[in-house]
Image: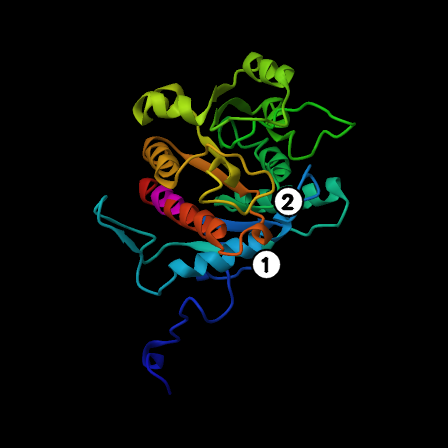
Amino acid sequence: MGHGYESGRLNLPFTGIATFGKYPYQPDWDALEADVAILGAPFDFGTQWRPGARFGPRAIREASTLFSFGHAGAYDHEDGVTYLGAGTRIVDMGDADIVHTDTETSHANIEAGVRAILAKGAIPVVLGGDHSVNIPCIRAFADQGPIHIVQIDAHLDFVDERHGVRHGHGNPMRRAAEQDHVTGLTQLGIRNVSSTAKDGYDDAARMGSDILSVRQMRALGTEALLERIPADVPLYLTIDIDGFDPSIAPGTGTPSHGGFLYYEVLEVLAALARRQPIVGVDLVEVAPAYDHTDTTAILAAQLLLNLIGRVLHAQG
């Protein structure tokens, strides 16, 4: 018997199976009992340049073990709150089945996974995958009532159709805006050369999007930004890791300089979590092969764990 076995296995970060945050694995989706359920969506056939986000879920899970030291929760001395404390019900459901080169089947399987989470009253947190995985995620909310989408991203992703493609990673926000249950979009961090042409920006504005660059957000400040986001509707958060600056998040297919730093994003998301229900999250476009330091995946895991902790704390 080694040290620690008297009270159970230590399960330190560098041992064992790398589920998200070392939380329990639940492969039986019908038996799901959780407040938050993690679903991997290792699909990257929607990418237009560098592939590799299919390995995002695996990398984020591996990185998330850094924050799983086995003590009860994570004490934040700035907030004076212990997040993710004892009794936190988070489970890792594994991944949706992906059929290589088959976008429609793969997306349908992702949608089925999110619907399984919602059917059990849990909050889905989906690990992409490229940003096209947001399309089935938003479809899954069709019978859940209205949602407003807050997007963190370098790119607008509002292409209607290009070369006949309607469900790639340049299309998801356009597909979302078309849904009856989506009341509007707040698109934050949009900058530089984009996959979306001017007509896409015009369409987004016409369909109700509020589009702000990193520089515009910094000029506004967090409080003024929050006043622009509707407070009377549940929020769905879609976070593209390329919304962050590539100096801290190089492991992505389409890096764009001039991006966010960690606290700029966390402060906005934490304020939203305190203010209103957050009913779903996806984090996409982590492509670990382009970052041999793993800092991109660590950023993704750190942001998600801190966000989940604040959402659960706010919801009591």
Q: Residue at x 53, y 32 (%)?
A: 144
Residue 146 x %, y %: 51, 26
Residue 232 in the figure: left or right of residue 174? left
Nearer to me, 314 or 264: 264
Above/below status of 268 relative to 79: above
User: Which element is circle 1 on?
Assistant: loop
Q: Residue flagged by tag 2: what amino acid is it?
A: Ile
Q: Which residues are magenta?
A: 307-312
* Relative to 112, 65 lies left or right: left
Q: Residue at x 35, y 21 (%)?
A: 219
Residue, x 38% and y 41% (percent of image)? 262
| Foreground pick, 215 / 24 | 215
Residue 230 placement: quadrant: top left
Residue 192: percent from left, percent from top: 54, 26
- At label 1, counting other C-alpha atoms closer than 10 Å, the crowd grade (few under 14, some 14-19, many 20 or more) is few
Q: Amino acid at mark 1?
A: Asp
Q: In the figure, residue 202 lies in which quadrant?
A: top right
Q: How many marks?
A: 2
Give the numbered dot on residue 28: 1
Q: Main secondary structure of the magenta part?
A: helix
Q: Which quarter of the figure has residue 162? A: top right
Residue 272 part of the magenta-drawn span: no
Question: Farthest residue toward the bottom?
Answer: 1
Q: Which residue is mark 2?
A: 110
User: Does the image show residue 155?
Assistant: yes
